[in-house]
Image (cartoon, helix red, strand yellow):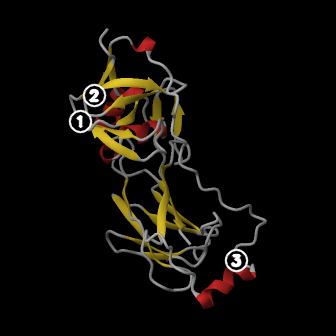
Amino acid sequence: DTQPVVRVSSGINVRSGPGIDYPIAGALNSGESAQIVSKNPTGDWWEVTLASGGNGWVYGPLVETAGDTGSIAVAVNIPTPPPTPVPAPTEAPVEAAPVEAAPVEEAAPAPASGGPDFRVVEKRLWDVVENGGRLDGPSVTCGEKRQLVARVLDANGNLLNGVAVQAIYGAQEIFVTGSQGKGDGTVEFVLGGGQALKVIRDADGREVSSEEVYNLSTKPWEIPFETLIGGHFCTDEASCQSFVDATGCYGHYSWTVTFQRNY
């Protein structure tokens, strides 16, 4: 029997696990196909073999299949999803606790791993309703928001005030977490066409290294289909293509980014 395959009519991301929270492991370009190895328990993601020899996962609604997919078994060893950072409960002291102030004098040591001081643990597009819009069956009424919210956590997952976050494009605004009245560990930017972010200073005032987050766009054609599907702007490749062709919700998308300190 011929091994079942997926085929793509436009380029899509291949991820290291069955979900958009997993890191991108590669891509399939327009017209490419890949053998199906297994599926996830809900059957909406396929594990495929890449040309490089490794395996990765593609989102079912974005691909066409050929061959008997009914015989494809559920994967035995599905990678554990990356942890979603959970802020500390509100009753846990963040600003007032002496332990927050004490390290300022001593300057917390840089991470021994040699990686950046701040890494990105979340990049999330707000869904239709969260952004102020509504759904009527398959019809999307766009919201008016275009916000960019950045949160900063310490190594234990507590929201961290006093950290400077900078926009990379345009006026390159710098906002300090907890200083805008938006909540502990949080800053907010207004999105124009799009933006990128990085952390530049820790709470003790010293400069730090940071992963940078790009493609925080308000242009639908710059947002991956799988991300649009996750936000309920469309449901499959065909509806996403129609949505993008119609420049759906152009200029009105919002994102949340979370950075976490490594030490």
> How crowded is the residue under tag 2: few (<14 C-alpha within 10 Å), some, or many (20+)?
some
**Is the C-beta separation of discs 3 and 2 under 8 Å?**
no
The amino acid beneath tag 1 is: Asn
Distance CA(mark 1)–CA(mark 2): 7 Å
Q: Residue at x 46, y 30 (%)?
A: 139
* Label 3 SS: loop
In the rendered image, residue 30, in percent from the top left (x then y), is placed at 22, 32
The amino acid beneath tag 3 is: Glu
Residue 236 visible in the shown view: no
Q: Residue at x 74, y 83 (%)?
A: 98
* Residue at which label 1 appears: 29
- Give the position of the C terminus as an image quadrant: bottom right
Q: Is residue 71 above or below residue 234?
A: above
| Label located before the other in sequence (1 or 3) | 1
Q: Using the image as rendered, state which of residue 196 and residue 173 is in the foreground.
A: 196
Mark 1 or 3: the one toward you: 1
Q: Which corner quadrant of the image does residue 34 belong to?
A: top left
* Label 1 SS: loop
Distance CA(mark 1)–CA(mark 3): 48 Å
> How crowded is the residue under tag 1: few (<14 C-alpha within 10 Å), some, or many (20+)?
some
- Residue at far left of view: 31
Looking at the image, residue 188 sits to the left or right of residue 27; the answer is right
Distance CA(mark 3)–CA(mark 2): 50 Å
In the rendered image, residue 80, in percent from the top left (x then y), is placed at 55, 42
> How crowded is the residue under tag 3: few (<14 C-alpha within 10 Å), some, or many (20+)?
some
* Residue at which label 3 appears: 95
* Residue at which label 2 appears: 8
Q: Using the image as rendered, state which of residue 174 and residue 93 is in the foreground.
A: 93
- Residue at far bottom of view: 105
In the rendered image, residue 2, in percent from the top left (x then y), is placed at 29, 12
The amino acid beneath tag 2 is: Val
